[in-house]
Image (tube, rainbow, N blue to C red):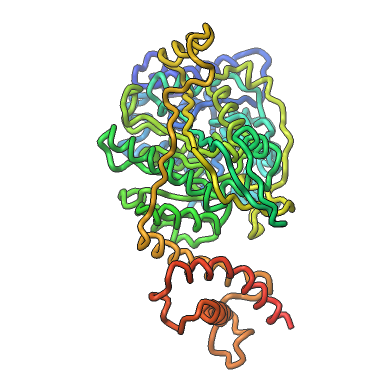
């Protein structure tokens, strides 16, 4: 083997084409592992868009590695990292930044059966995703000697506290480990493994033009009225709205699912999108929305469609074909809004996502940072003053996002000492209604709450990076020359009133989607295969077709229409059908169990 990371002389320290955080990462890794005594595992924190892939490419040179193993948390990131090392491509980091000219480290990729051990022996760097190395009887790990790698690099390393990652570290006990992440915390609040030897703050990245300048738009109702399951109606002022959001998880859920407040977030995010598109003269800018679960995705999509926007969603419960179709629409700028449940996470790169609409509950900083990271990618590189390089986060005051935004403001300016002082926070196991893990949604057994009205919803703007004008305002407030609550950006939210046709069409689509989702729920509850023919006594229709037909018939009967007449439904009939789906589904389940 050539040992290219030892033999080659890369152009790094005086290279103007390499970014500051990439050079500083390299220098800190070199310094740490040059000490007579050093810890085997360390961490590097770089915000999204600051060149983490390039920093990973420089790391083996800092340690003069014999052979490096680069681990990604999923296939998409692994594919991108492998491309970054594939020297036959013209756009690799080494070529683009003139780190190397003629000779390059030899890459290989572990995926399925496309490579063999001989390929790995020839390689200087091996890239894979963690799923390829899982399981006690893993054929790759069992065939690789304990000293096969002398360096392991984890990308998105806030995952690597998990048992699977630890097993991998134990298999190569002499290998040094460098962890890279945009956040030092996992979704459960635990700190990623390894002392953090270098971090580059979000505020530094904004000033350098590596990431977008961010602001938060908080929606503050003067008063909010809601009804609990017992029929008791309450009206509370803003201060109580915020307090309930902090203390009552049922109330938090109602804020982002009740039609009244959900539409407030929708309207505010649309206003921000249109404003940014006009200022930047760019209609490619888009909204990304975070949802609680599968059904909530569809509810949010319908709300945006009713306001005239082109919206769609991706979800792990959808097949690959559906999600690929949505991604294609996004990339071809045929969408205004994309909705997801932590699906567009690490490794997803679409710079034109500029407005983040928060319809989720974030219990910890890490998943919030991962979601906000989707709107942090700059459109114009190294240009902090570009109008295109602005991002907005929109959330309702009652959704308990205020603490996460404040944490993020602190995190954005944090230094190494701050990271070292981070302590694990309380972790609440979270699942969604379909049984899949969903760290953005905390289920509760509290009574349901429905928000029915809110008055004078004010928009409060908060900037991540204070500029001179904001500092001047703070000085005037401190001197008592202007009121403490003065905010020049504060305004009353103007509701977007959809046409009746838009409302009816969006709700009709939502009804069709909800029926299909409910059929899946019924099948799951009954323990039946969708393609089986257990229910149809004539053995003609599949279980899915049989149950859908039954659900359709009950809904049609309820709203008073004949088969194949849904085109004629009024909006009142559609709303009645949507509100009755759960009850009808439960009746069908009881019937089929008999």
Residue, x 65% and y 31% (percent of image)? 192
* Residue 442 appears left or right of 107: right
273 lies above or below 3: below
Q: Is residue 143 visible?
A: no
In which quadrant of the rendered image does the C terminus lie?
bottom right
Residue 168 vertical placement versus 529 (above, below): above
Q: Residue furthest left?
A: 281
Task: Residue at 47%, 81% (x, y): give it.
Answer: 561
Q: How many marks?
A: 0
Work out whether residue 120 can be spotted.
yes
Decide: is 332 above or below 353. below
Task: Using the image, determine if residue 318 lies above or below residue 140.
Answer: below
Give percent across and percent down for residue 579: 57, 66
Asked if residue 146 lies left or right of residue 51, the reply is right
Identified at 36% across, 34% down, the residue is 92
The x, y position of residue 414, in whole percent, is 57, 19
Q: Residue at x 50, y 50 (%)?
A: 340
From the top left corner, tell me how far across and down residue 527 is, in percent.
68, 73
Outermost residue to the top: 479
Nearest the viewer among 377 and 578 is: 578
Residue in front for this viewpoint, 82 or 106: 82
Give the farthest residue toward the bottom: 538
- The one nearer the camera, 265 or 290, is 265
Residue 209 % position (x, y): 37, 23
The reply, left or right, for residue 145 in relation to residue 497 is right
């Amino acid at each position: 083997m050539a040992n290219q990371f030892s033999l080659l002389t890369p152009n790094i320290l005086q290279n103007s084409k390499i970014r500051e955080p990439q050079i500083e990462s390299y220098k800190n890794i070199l310094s740490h592992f040059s000490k007579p005594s050093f810890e085997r595992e360390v961490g590097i924190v770089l915000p999204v868009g600051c060149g983490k892939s390039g920093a990973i490419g420089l790391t083996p040179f800092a340690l003069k590695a014999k052979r490096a193993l680069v681990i990604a948390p999923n296939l998409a990131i692994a594919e991108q990292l492998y491309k970054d090392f594939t020297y036959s491509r013209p756009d690799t980091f080494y070529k683009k930044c003139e780190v190397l000219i003629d000779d390059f480290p030899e890459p290989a990729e572990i995926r399925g059966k496309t490579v063999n051990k001989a390929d790995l022996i020839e390689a200087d760097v091996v890239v894979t995703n963690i799923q390829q190395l899982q399981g006690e009887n893993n054929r790759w790990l069992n065939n690789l000697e304990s000293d096969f790698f002398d360096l392991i690099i984890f990308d998105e390393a806030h995952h690597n506290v998990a048992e699977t990652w630890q097993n991998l570290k134990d298999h190569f006990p002499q290998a040094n480990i460098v962890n890279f992440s945009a956040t030092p915390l996992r979704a459960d609040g635990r700190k990623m493994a390894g002392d953090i030897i270098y971090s580059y703050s979000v505020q530094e990245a904004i000033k350098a033009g590596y990431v977008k300048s961010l602001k938060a738009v908080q929606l503050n109702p003067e008063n909010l009225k809601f009804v609990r399951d017992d029929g008791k109606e309450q009206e509370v002022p803003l201060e109580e709205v915020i307090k309930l959001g902090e203390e009552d998880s049922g109330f938090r859920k109602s804020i982002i699912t009740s039609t009244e407040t959900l539409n407030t977030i929708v309207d505010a995010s649309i206003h921000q999108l249109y404003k940014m598109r006009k200022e930047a003269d760019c209609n490619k800018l888009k909204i990304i929305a975070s949802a609680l679960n599968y059904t909530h995705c569809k509810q949010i999509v319908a709300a945006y469609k009713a306001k005239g926007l082109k919206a769609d969603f991706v979800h792990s419960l959808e097949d690959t074909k559906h999600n690929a179709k949505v991604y294609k629409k996004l990339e071809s700028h045929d969408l205004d809004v994309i909705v997801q449940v932590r699906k567009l996470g690490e490794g997803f790169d679409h710079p034109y996502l500029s407005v983040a609409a928060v319809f989720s509950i974030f219990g910890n900083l890490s998943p919030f940072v991962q979601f906000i990271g989707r709107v942090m990618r700059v459109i114009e590189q190294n240009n902090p003053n570009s109008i295109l390089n602005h991002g907005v986060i929109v959330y309702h005051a009652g959704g308990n996002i205020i603490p996460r935004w404040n944490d993020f403001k602190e995190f954005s300016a944090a230094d190494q000492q701050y990271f070292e002082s981070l302590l694990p926070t309380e972790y609440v196991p979270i699942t969604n209604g379909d049984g899949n893990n969903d760290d953005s949604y905390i289920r509760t057994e509290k009574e349901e709450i429905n928000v029915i009205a809110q008055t004078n919803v004010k928009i409060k703007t908060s900037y991540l990076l204070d500029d001179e004008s904001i500092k001047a305002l703070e000085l005037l407030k401190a001197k008592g020359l202007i009121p403490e609550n003065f905010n020049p950006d504060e305004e009353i939210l103007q509701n977007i009133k959809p046409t009746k046709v838009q409302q009816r069409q969006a709700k009709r689509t939502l009804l069709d989607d909800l029926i299909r989702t409910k059929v899946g729920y019924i099948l799951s509850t009954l323990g039946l295969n969708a393609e089986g023919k257990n229910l149809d006594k004539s053995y003609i229709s599949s279980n899915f077709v049989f149950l859908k037909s039954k659900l359709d018939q009950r809904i049609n009967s309820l709203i008073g229409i004949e088969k194949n007449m849904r085109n004629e439904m009024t909006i009142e009939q559609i709303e009645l059908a949507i509100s009755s789906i759960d009850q009808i589904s439960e009746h069908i389940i009881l019937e089929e169990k008999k």
